[in-house]
Image (cartoon, rainbow, N blue to C red):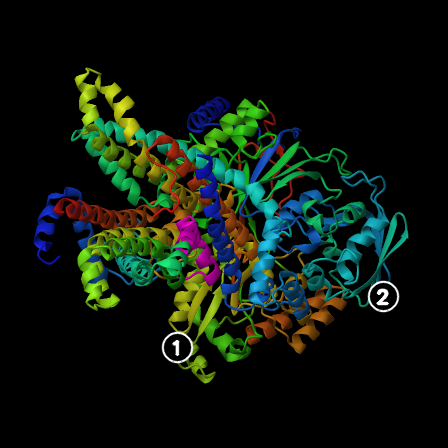
Amino acid sequence: MSRSTPRLWRRFRRNRGGVVGLLLLMALLAAAPLAPVLAPHGPADQDLLERLARPSPRHPLGTDDLGRDLLSRILYGARVSLLVGVVGVGIALSIGVPVGALAGFAGGRLDQLLMRAMDVLLSFPAFLLAVAIVGIAGPSLQNALLAIGVIGIPTYARLVRATVLVVKAEPYVEAAHALGAGTGRVLVRHVLPNCAGPLLVQATLGMGTAILEVAGLSFLGLGAQPPTPEWGAMLSSGRAWVLTAPWLLLWPGLAILLAVLGFTLVGDGLRDALASAQ
Amino acid sequence: MARYVAHRLLLLVPVLLGVAFVTFLTLHLTPGDPAQIMLGERATPEAVAALRERLGLDRPFATQFLRYLGRLATGDLGRSIQTNNEVLGELGLKFPATIELALFAMGVAIVLGVAAGALSASRPATLWDYLGTIGSTVGIAMPVFWLGLLLMLLFSALLGWLPFSGRLSPASDLQRVTHFYLLDSLLTGNLRAFGDSLRHLLLPGLTLATVPTAFIARMTRAALLEALGGEYIRTARAKGLSEPVVLLRHALRNALVPVLTITGLQFGTLLGGAVLTESIFAWPGLGRLTVDAIFARDYPLVQGCLLLFALTFVLLNLLTDLLYVRADPRIRYRPEPA
Amino acid sequence: MRTFVLTLATILVLTGSFLVLPVHLPAVPRTGEAVAGPAPLTGGTLIYGKPKDAVKLDPHNVTDGESFDVTRQIFDTLVQFREGTTEVEPALATSWRVSRDGLAWTFMLRRGVRFHDGTPFTAKAVVTSFERQMFKHHPHHRGPFEYWASMFGGYPGIVTRVRALDEQTVRFELSRPSAPFLANLAMPFAAIMSPAALERYGEDIFKHPIGTGPFSLVEWLPNERVVLQANRGHWAGRPYLDRLIFKPILENSVRLLELEAGTIHGMHGINTDDVPRIQRNPALVLHTQTGMNVGYLAFNTEKPLFRDRRVRQALSHAVDKARLVKGLFGAYGVPAQTPLPPVIWGHHEGIRPYTYDPERARRLLAEAGHPRGFRADLWAMSVARPYMPDARKVAEVLQAQFRAVGVEVRIVSYEWGAYLERSRNGEHDMLLLGWTGDNGDPDNFLYTLLSSDAAVRGSANNLAFFRDRRLDDVLRRAQALNTREERAPLYRKAQELIHEEAPWIPLVHSVQLGAVRRGVRGYALNPTGDHRFHRVWLEQPGGRP
């Protein structure tokens, strides 16, 4: 893997979409930590006498219905979205990878059981399952993240299990096993390097999906709660002002689109680069 | 084929049991006493006890689950807390709306997606191809709830071409038979209602179709390009067949299986997306019912919605699988799918 | 010449709007509106957009305006308010008298009236409609019947008996005199329902409302539409409209867009920021009415946190009410200092408001043992109300203002029906709600919303669950007196007590807004918040929406 990294980058670089995606991601990654520096106002600072102000030098993207600076909220929203992507995928990975590995190595009944459980999760339309989980657990950003994590599990579990099954059958792995190498060692030395590429691709795409889904949940009022500057929630409250302040609808939507596009393009770029590197 | 179908149906059993278990769990995972939650925290102890009794909450867990399965088997999904109606009846009223919307969107997605993909593939590296590729990439990343609002703003508010929300004009005189309004209007020969419900379908349908269209276009393009590089295509061309014929008759047929696969996968997106689309366009379907039920803490109704969504999804997937057994004779019934 | 210009302008407006609008409704010229107005035309269908569907169509078992807006058309009451006022006039009762001790009210009923199901309206129907609400053991007493309890103080409360003296005469017997009693009978919960329908539908009566009102129910598709048709045999003459359709549209902005596009004829639930847009549009007519209402925040005084008066007072000082009202309500709201709106007699002008003083708020919180503040839930309704078009936004403003004094609140919303039900159970810490007076009497605010009689869990209208002996005593004494002169001082006293104890933060008295398309006539906003359609007519009834 390490030797091929520069080659991977060279290949990735040739993918125009991937590079655009990377730029978008870099913008997101920069906006998140720098929000306090870049934002002209606090994300929750209300000025009720300056509601629904048009874009102006003081408020470059205008203000919302409570007189909060829209640019600042969008910038701080980058933090929320990044958090959503990382934590959402993190949860899915940290459960999905062990489940997949366990199923693959153990085989037999345990494998059957785990994979049927994954099938069950996959038999719900993903977003709907997320809606139901949040509905049961109560609307909040934490629960939304949890829900997004849960619905992501099967993808990773299946991916890892498939790799395990292939790797297990390799002669050198059988040999290593025969020589007394433990399952953990096989997992770390042979399985993970083999599925690192696909996992990376999947995780990158998954972050985009997570952002989209949490935005959707927040739009329905099931995700981030006020005053958290979350893009989906901003869009939802902006609906009330389509007539008087359409920019409240424009910017948060565009922010979601660009962030998700960034992850999607980079994920696709990575996949192509990995495919052609083999 | 019949054996394959039987086998697939058999495989559904454990999955459906699992689905029932998950919906059953939804009530038990809620923090606190389900009966208390359903009735509110200050409900009288007698009322709570009565509901516990009714739901069998005082029995052991396994017994409860078996009883739940037993009730499901008889079609008893309980009663809605809000309206006191049978959950099954409530679902039955809203389900056709969602199916109508989803099928319409899927139809749009297949037509637009395959057309766009074919266009791209037939003219690779041209402006059309770039536009198609960019379009499908953006489509995949598109927050549909945003797109829906923008479409409504443009077509309903600014241009005034299409209605804002709902399935029919409020004053419509459509006689409801099947609750699939397009069908009902044809059955009753009410052409005005047909046009009316079609106009209402357009915006939510297009919105919902966006993501599947993008995926299908993408897959069509990739599969066609691969097929066009194949040996038999060269033969076909050598035979002097015109390019459209090559594309449509030979390449497209070979690209069908991957396109079908991705289409099947899109049903999940479609049904999940229905939740958002329905809430934007006030489409009185299952998705909106689910969200309303959640905000009303009407758990029997939430359970019913979840169950029905899963069942629909599972059956649609089965249907796609069967379709591609038909489309590709190379896929054969295998006893144990890896 | 002037006529010519007018006509020309009208034609321009007309053609213009036809070019812009895809459909549907007759855009009607303004000519002839100035003086007496033309004679009403009969026929046509009116589509009215409302924020939310009815919860139930059983007027005895709901408390919210969204439900009453529909049941008002279907049911009549014994007496009613003259349109646009709170003066009582005959309805299903043609005359009445009260005994000298004020304990017996006798009503003579209108003859020849029939329910929509064809059964005759008799004294028995009156008895059933009230006994069902007042007696817990009544076979049809299924549901919360919260309105009854909040008006009459329990089951049966101060009404001890409702008796049919003969087919056409009914007598109400009271345990103590009640000045607002007659006006209470004009309120929508006092609707007269068909006993035959109750027998027939039992628990499902809320889906099958059968009254004597100007319209009868054709179809209710929840969250889609309610279709009503004219009751041609109504005792006060048939309504002008043939059909009346209610369409629930959740978003204020979308509802207005639909009105502009002509897919609905009228609506309420208007963002104040959208008012100029309506005024600029020649195809629309804005209606305003100084609301007999109050929007408030109630502390649940049963929760340990808010049992302490200092905490309630502290938060009262933490709210910058002037800024909140100016910002969110603009010209269509005034800051409230007492529960009673200024348009109602008995309103206390001299209440010294809690000043906006975060410093003092923090000091009071520290005194009460919360030097670092605390966390609590603030409930906010998710649908537009006449007294608060966007409560979630009000909640966000309060959240920011409370945070400034160290109090962190989480904003919680439920679906409208669940919101009311759960708040009546007292599950909230703090909640936003409001009230539109139903009868123009101070009792209908102060007793209904703050007496301990109305603080019964499950059917509470006193959502602060505020119980104060002194206040109860003052309010009951005021009920027993007959003249305004005698009662007003007592209500002023009550407002002082409420102000001092601060079970609420009264927030705003807002102007009711409604809008219709030009060509819709006879539409009026009522001080009671009712929307009535008996006398509404279309200038072009043939127009098909």
The residue indicated by pointer 2 is C101
Give the mark nearer the N terminus: 1 vs 2: 2
Camera-side mark, 1 or 2: 1
Q: Which residues are magenta?
A: A117-140
| Residue A218 position within the rendered picture, expressed as x and y whole percent measured from the top left | 39, 55
**Secondary-structure class at tag 1:** helix
Quarter of the image where one finds residue B149 = top left
- Mark 1: amino acid: Glu
Do pointers 1 and 2 mark residues of a single chain? yes
The circle on residue A140 is none
Q: Is residue A38 visible?
A: no
Main SS category, magenta section: helix
Residue at image coords 36%, 31%: B327
Q: Which chain is mark 1 on?
A: C
| Residue C211 position within the rendered picture, expressed as x and y whole percent measured from the top left | 74, 44
Separation of disc 1 and disc 2 at Cα? 54 Å
**Secondary-structure class at tag 2:** loop
| Residue C195 position within the rendered picture, expressed as x and y whole percent measured from the top left | 80, 48
Compared across the picture, whether C361 is left or right of A262 comes to right
The local crowd at label 1, few if under 14, some if 14 to 19, many if 20 or more residues have their Cα within 10 Å, is some
The residue indicated by pointer 1 is C359
